[in-house]
Amino acid sequence: MVDQVEHEGRQLKSNNNLLKSFGYAFAGLKVAAQERNFKIDLAFAVFALVVCGVLRVDAHGWLAVILCIGAVLSLECVNTAIEAAVDLASPDIHPLAKRAKDCGAAAPLIAAMISVVVGLFVWIPALIELLQG
Ligand SMILES: Nc1ncnc2c1ncn2[C@@H]1O[C@H](COP(=O)(O)OP(=O)(O)OP(=O)(O)O)[C@@H](O)[C@H]1O
């Protein structure tokens, strides 16, 4: 009986922790979403989704574009985290702080460049198909 109560207590605590960690993750998303680059990426994401709709892209195309959007926005969050950690650890100018920030910024940039290539691969055939009726 005591064991079961303890077990249920632990379960409740772990559920609470899980809920709390979701809460922290959403709080992080809210912070990252205030960054200028995140907003720009979000605008491009909406544009990309509208283009997919207009060109009547197939399911695989939608999936590829959605994955790209997820990659870019996720990496923007990671970059925001790196910037904050670097500012905390190295408020003064330091070559390693520069390296960390520049490499952090490179991550969403690479994803964005790949996303453009993916977009072209998805949209060009869809546009040709649409024009051919
Ligand atoms: N502590 C530092 N030491 C050395 N170089 C730094 C340092 N902080 C920033 N930098 C350089 O300045 C650049 C811009 O840094 P900053 O913190 O303004 O980020 P950002 O890329 O402008 O991001 P955001 O526009 O989101 O603020 C970095 O990429 C890095 O090259």
Image: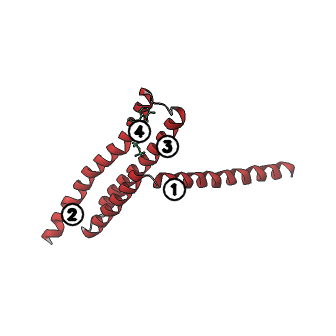
**Secondary-structure class at tag 4:** helix
**Secondary-structure class at tag 1:** helix
**Is label 2 or label 4 in front?**
4
Q: Considering only order in the chain, which callout, 4 or 3, is on the residue closer to the N terminus?
A: 3
Residue at the limit of the structure toward the right, as seen here: 2
On screen, 82 above or below 94? below
* Residue at image point 38% right, 58% down: 42
Disc 4 marks which residue?
104
Disc 2 marks which residue?
126
Q: State if disc 4 and disc 2 touch (CB < 8 Å).
A: no
Callout 4: CB less than 8 Å from ligand 1: yes
Q: Which of 93 and 121 is in front in this view?
A: 93
* Residue at image point 33% right, 61% down: 62
* Residue at image point 50% right, 37% down: 87
Q: Considering only order in the chain, which callout, 2 or 3, is on the residue closer to the N terminus?
A: 3
| Local crowd size for mark 2, using a 10 Å CA cut-off: few (<14), some (14–19), many (≥20) | some
Q: In this view, does 112 lie to the left or right of 33?
A: left
Q: Quadrant of the C terminus?
A: bottom left
Q: How far apart are marks 3 and 2 (CA)?
A: 37 Å
Callout 3: CB less than 8 Å from ligand 1: no
Q: Residue 30 carries which label?
A: 1
**Is label 3 or label 2 in front?**
3
Q: Considering only order in the chain, which callout, 4 or 2, is on the residue closer to the N terminus?
A: 4
Q: Residue 124: name its quadrant.
A: bottom left
**Secondary-structure class at tag 2:** helix
Horizontal and vertical percent position of residue 104? 41, 39
Q: In this view, does 126 lie to the left or right of 101?
A: left
On screen, 17 above or below 125? above
**Is label 2 or label 1 in front?**
1
Q: Which amino acid does label 2 sit on?
A: Ala
Disc 3 marks which residue?
81
